[in-house]
Amino acid sequence: SPPVCQPSRLSAKPHLRPAKVCQAGDAYTREKFKPRARRDLEKEKQRLQNILATGKDVVEHKVKRMLVQTEEEEIPEPDRFEELVNEVQERREFLAEMEALGQGKEYRRIVLTEISQKMREMEIIDKKRSEEMREIMTKDFTGGNKS
């Protein structure tokens, strides 16, 4: 005959089970307590003091700023001159599409104005670059003569 604490089959009629049968199952086994990672209580106190004193979470903002700065350093900023070249090209393509659709007359003046603005900005950038290059070159030549 099977042991008392392990019923061989479940009966169709509802009935009370003996305590040994209930305890033999997994219902009474406890899971082990696993503590979570503890936070630094001193930092938490300081953070709450800042919030109550100023109404802002100052420490968190500094951390966010540091993360933003490191991300900016890692990702090189695309050259503004190249961006302008791409924008001018996009506007020319748009104007060509509109002319192909028969709506070029409506958009021509607007798009040409935008293109001229971009070209002007490109000229300004080009002048600044050439001036910077001249300064660098003159420094190199004057520095080279002294030594």
Image (cartoon, grey):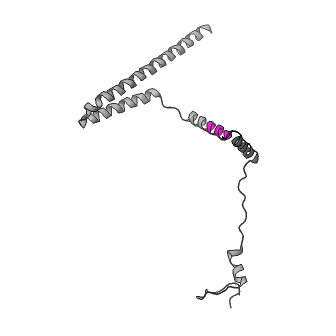
Depicted 131 relative to depicted 31: above or below: above
Q: Taking 105 as reference, is 120 left or right?
A: right
Identify the image quadrant of the C terminus. Answer: top right
Residue reaching furthest left?
A: 102
User: Magenta stretch: dominant SS?
Assistant: helix
Question: What residue lies at 28% left-to-right and 33% top-to-bottom?
Answer: 96
Q: Taking 147 as reference, is 118 left or right?
A: left
Q: Quadrant of residue 22?
A: bottom right
Q: Quadrant of residue 4?
A: bottom right
Residue 95: x %, y % from top left: 30, 32
Q: Is residue 69 magenta?
A: no
Number of labels in the image equals 0
Q: Taking 8 as reference, is 128 left or right?
A: left
Residue 26: x %, y % from top left: 68, 75
Which of the two residues, 141 or 14, is positioned nearer the viewer here? Answer: 14
Residue reaching furthest right?
A: 42
Question: What residue lies at 29% left-to-right and 29% top-to-bottom?
Answer: 108
Question: What residue lies at 54% left-to-right and 15% top-to-bottom?
Answer: 136
Specify start and end residues of the magenta stretch as a single range. Answer: 57-67
